[in-house]
Amino acid sequence: MVGLATLRRICLHYSISLGTPLHVYPPSALLPYTPSTARTATVDTLLQDRDAFIADVRDRLLQAQQHAKRHYDAQHCPLEFSVNDWVWLRLLNRNTCSLLPGAKGKLSPHYAGPFQVVEQIGNVAYKLRLPASARIHDIFHVGVLKPFHGTPPVLTPSLLPLAACFNNPPKF
């Protein structure tokens, strides 16, 4: 199902490219049926069944949301880092060859670092001190960070130069 913001973006795109504006209006509300206002008994029954069905769907959606919340809360462990903490950086879909030497497909390391937290941005984003040779953005979501335990390194670990990566590309 397409959201209202997405429809507005699509309409803006078409109005810019075609020169004619398209308008998107929010859907009208589905009004509940008051019993015995229909002209026939069949329509009355259908509308009452519709309202019962919608109420049942809302109850089941609420149950599903509560189940998902219980499962999330049971597994969730909130993470917070302070400035000067050391963290591991998870290499989700990044090119591991450009970050770490010896990256070989599925046997490559999942985490790079450790790197030092320079600044907290908002509640869930952190700026890391990456090496000058890094060619990735230095602000990451807390979900891709893992706390570093042990004695912190004196310097930020260096990354493999990008030219070395192109000379010896990983084999998949």
Image: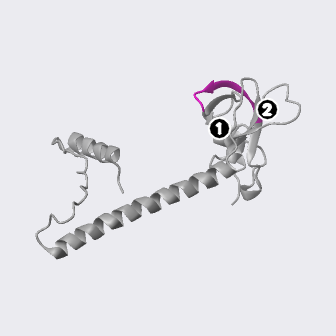
Q: Which residue lies furthest to the front in this view?
A: 36
Tell me if residue 132 can be seen: yes
Residue at the location (75% across, 24% down)? 84
> Amino acid under label 2?
Pro
Q: Which residue lies furthest to the right in this view?
A: 151
Would residue 29 be found to the left or right of residue 130 on screen?
A: left
**Magenta range:** 114-123
The percent position of residue 1, horizontal first and vertical second, equals: 36, 57
Name the element at disc 2.
Answer: loop
Q: What element carries label 1?
A: helix
Q: Observer-nearest residue: 45 or 68?
A: 45
Along the line of sight, the residue nearer the viewer: 62 or 171 = 62
Name the residue carrying label 2: 157
Task: Please name the residue shown 57% across and 28% down the image.
Answer: 122
Residue beneath the point at 18% across and 72% down: 43
Q: In this view, does 152 lie above or below 171?
A: above
Return the x and y of residue 42 as percentages of the image width and height. 18, 76
Q: How far apart are marks 1 and 2 (CA)?
A: 20 Å
Crowding at mark 2 (Cα within 10 Å: few <14, some 14-19, many 20+): some
In the image, taking residue 140 as reference, residue 82 lies left or right, namely right
Q: Which labelled disc corresponds to residue 142?
A: 1
User: Which quarter of the figure has residue 172?
Assistant: bottom right
